[in-house]
Image (cartoon, rainbow, N blue to C red):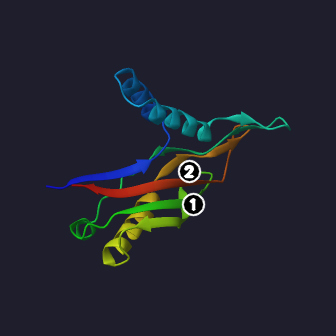
């Protein structure tokens, strides 16, 4: 029997807190450290000119659905997708900038389609400069793997 594992790499404090609790119970510290370091990607900062900037942050990620035919064919893939975020927090112009996988046929095309389909449905808290929303950019990793 196959176990399905679809991973979305998002940096959220919930993930970091969960990983820290896993560390306390004997988990791997490197995973928690990595989650906390990724959290800084979304940390607010002040520019030398004094502007207060809060980067866009995902607040409604949509999990991908493993296409049945791709799963049957044993197709796996890792995708890095970059996109624009308008000042309302909607994703625009998604594009796959890096991809790796074990096949280039129909199953892999289905994974690519699913990545672009779900990323368009994500919502973000938009980037703000001095409290005013502005357009921004972000990238996310989406991985499709099958554990047998």
Residue 25: numbered disc: none
Question: Which quadrant of the rendered structure holds the C terminus?
Answer: bottom left
Q: From this view, report whether residue 29 is shown above or below residue 126.
A: above
**x then y, percent, for residue 3:** 21, 52
Residue at point 43% right, 60% down? 78
Question: Which quadrant of the rendered structure holds the N terminus?
Answer: bottom left
Q: From this view, report whether residue 104 is shown above or below residue 132.
A: below
**x then y, percent, for residue 144:** 35, 58
Residue at point 64% right, 45% down? 127
**x then y, percent, for residue 91:** 53, 58
Residue projecting furthest to the top: 24
Crowd around label 2: few <14 · some 14–19 · many ≥20 (10 Å): many
Crowd around label 1: few <14 · some 14–19 · many ≥20 (10 Å): many
Residue at point 36% right, 69% down? 102
Query: Would you say the residues marked 2 and 1 are in contact, meaning their CB atoms lie under 8 Å apart?
Result: no
At mark 1, the secondary structure is: strand
Q: Say which of 57 and 79 sits in front.
A: 79
Rounded to the nearest angstrom, the CA distance separating label 2 from label 1 is 12 Å
Residue at point 35% right, 24% down? 26
Q: Quadrant of residue 74?
A: bottom left
Left or right of 26, for residue 92: right
At mark 2, the secondary structure is: loop
Residue projecting furthest to the right: 49
The residue that mark 1 highlights is 83
**x then y, percent, for residue 5:** 29, 51
Left or right of 25, for residue 69: left
Q: Say which of 93 and 41 sits in front.
A: 41
Q: Say which of 4 and 92 sits in front.
A: 4
The residue that mark 2 highlights is 89
Mark found first going from the N terminus, 2 or 1: 1
Foreground label between 2 and 1: 1
């Amino acid at each position: 029997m196959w176990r399905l594992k679809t991973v979305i790499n998002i940096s959220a404090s919930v993930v970091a807190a969960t990983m820290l609790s896993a560390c306390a119970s004997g988990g791997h510290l490197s995973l928690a450290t990595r989650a906390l370091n990724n959290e800084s990607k979304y940390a607010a900062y002040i520019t030398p000119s004094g502007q207060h900037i809060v980067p866009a942050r995902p607040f409604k990620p949509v999990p991908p659905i493993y296409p049945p035919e791709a799963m049957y064919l044993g197709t796996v893939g890792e995708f890095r997708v970059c996109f624009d975020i308008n000042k309302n927090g909607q994703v625009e112009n998604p594009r796959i900038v890096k991809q790796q996988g074990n096949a280039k046929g129909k199953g892999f095309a289905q994974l690519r389609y699913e990545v672009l389909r779900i990323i368009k449905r994500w919502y973000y808290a938009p980037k703000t400069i001095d409290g005013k929303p502005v357009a921004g950019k972000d990238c996310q990793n989406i991985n499709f793997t099958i554990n047998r």
